[in-house]
């Protein structure tokens, strides 16, 4: 094969509309007032290579037996009802324009001991049969999650694939002490709810592979952005603001 | 739905293994990409160059596959270089922050020139 020094493929490729435009920092807009909107604005997205812990690839999949819905219909429904399929206690504040490339969503997640964790995601890729989220600095994981559907043996299969590593040493400890199992349960529940929406029942199959067992100590500094710590530290401020607002309304 | 066509061929120049990629990098490229990478790394090259000049489609699963190769390369302390990426794919490598870890060259010659020749 010969190669030249000219730039190939300068015409717009077919995948161009599916990818987000590059951004240096995330910008959140249109978040409901009840949401805890912390740790997203101004953060950079993180690939699985920027994290601290071991890199894991996990696939969760469920066969939607009995449904006539084709993969594109499943993905359309999943995008439109993303929050609905999440386990209770966790909130996905969807972007106003739905799940499309470049949109940013705020997440309020339930942590151990009832603590709330505020973080977010950016939609980096979305087509008719898949969409991918990338996490920001401070999220439990650095990496991305791809949701997709395809046909297999005449059945539609829905799956979530994560490629992640814990973002900092604290998250890595939590991941090893039950966080990994909690993550598994999260996506098992999500896929089970999705299947139930389509009237299908079935077992979620899971496959986990450790892609890189090494810890990246050079990334231990990520703890500075740790969203769990920052959300907890911000709690008194939020309570004070809420009290102040209530008092202001009462004195009017 | 993208067609399921992908091909990867390995050749060598000096101490560098060059993997010429063609077609679409999506979930169907998994096996072909892994096989080509294994072949490329088999003779302990100083670096592996992924030549994307023949690639006209990459989805997010494809990017995840490239991350997997990058993780393998880092584990074995090997440089992974790229060439032939269009400006669109250079942008994608920036969005996904792969560009932080891979040296991106506009053409093969400059990629090869960046790898020091081993002393004989």
Image (cartoon, rainbow, N blue to C red):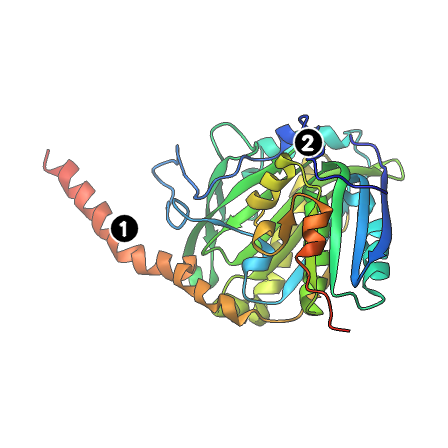
Q: Which mark is residue B76?
A: none
Q: Are marks 1 and 2 on the same chain?
A: yes
On screen, residue A115 versus residue B105, left or right, reads left
Who's the residue at 69% across and 58% down the image? B80
Chain for mark 2?
A
The residue wearing badge 1 is A238
Q: Is residue A73 above or below residue B116?
A: above
Where the C terminus of chain A falls, by quadrant? top left
Mark 2 closeness class: few <14, some 14–19, many ≥20 residues within 10 Å: some
Figure quadrant of residue B93: top right
Q: Is residue A216 above or below residue B7?
A: below
Using the rendered image of the protein, determine whether residue A110 is visible from the camera's viewpoint: yes
Kindly give the residue lying farthest to the front in the view shown. Answer: B120
Circle 2 — which element? loop
On screen, residue B98 versus residue A230, left or right, reads right
Percent x, y of residue B46: 74, 65
Where the N terminus of chain A falls, by quadrant? top right
The residue wearing badge 2 is A15
Q: Nearer the viewer, residue B90 or A53?
A: B90
Q: Is residue A251 above or below residue B19?
A: above
Chain for mark 1?
A
Q: CA distance from mark 1 to mark 2?
A: 42 Å
Viewer-nearest of discs 1 and 2: 2
């Amino acid at each position: 094969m010969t190669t030249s020094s000219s730039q190939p493929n300068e015409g717009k490729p077919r995948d161009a509309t599916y990818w987000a435009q590059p951004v240096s920092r995330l910008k959140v807009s249109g978040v409901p007032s009840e949401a805890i909107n912390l740790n997203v604005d101004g953060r950079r997205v993180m690939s699985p290579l920027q994290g601290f812990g071991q890199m894991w690839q996990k696939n969760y999949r469920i066969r939607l037996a009995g449904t006539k819905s084709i993969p594109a219909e499943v993905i359309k429904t999943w995008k439109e009802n993303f929050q609905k399929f999440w386990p209770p206690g966790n909130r996905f504040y969807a972007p106003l324009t739905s799940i499309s490339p470049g949109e940013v969503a705020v997440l309020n997640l339930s942590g151990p001991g009832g603590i709330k964790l505020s973080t977010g995601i950016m939609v980096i890729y979305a087509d008719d049969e898949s969409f991918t989220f990338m996490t920001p600095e401070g999220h439990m994981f650095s990496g991305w999650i791809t949701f997709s559907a395809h046909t297999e043996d005449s059945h539609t299969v829905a799956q979530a694939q994560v490629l992640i590593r814990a973002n900092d040493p604290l998250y890595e400890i939590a991941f090893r002490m039950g966080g990994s199992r909690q993550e598994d349960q999260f996506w098992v529940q999500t896929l089970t709810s999705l299947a139930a929406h389509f009237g299908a029942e079935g077992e979620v199959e899971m496959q986990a592979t450790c892609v890189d067992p090494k810890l990246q100590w050079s990334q231990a500094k990520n703890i500075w952005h740790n969203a769990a710590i920052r959300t907890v530290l911000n709690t008194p401020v939020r309570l004070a603001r809420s009290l102040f607002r209530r008092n202001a309304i009462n004195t009017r | 739905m993208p067609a399921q066509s992908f091909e990867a061929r390995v050749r060598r120049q000096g101490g560098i293994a060059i993997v010429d990629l063609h077609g679409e990098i999506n979930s169907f490229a998994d096996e072909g990409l892994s096989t080509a990478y294994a072949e490329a790394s088999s003779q302990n090259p100083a670096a592996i160059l992924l030549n994307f000049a023949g690639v006209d489609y990459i989805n997010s699963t494809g990017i995840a596959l490239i991350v997997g190769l990058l993780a393998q390369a880092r584990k074995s302390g090997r440089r992974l270089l790229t060439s032939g990426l269009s400006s669109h794919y250079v942008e994608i490598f920036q969005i996904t922050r792969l560009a932080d870890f891979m040296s991106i060259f506009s053409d093969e010659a400059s990629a090869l020139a960046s790898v020091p020749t081993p002393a004989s």
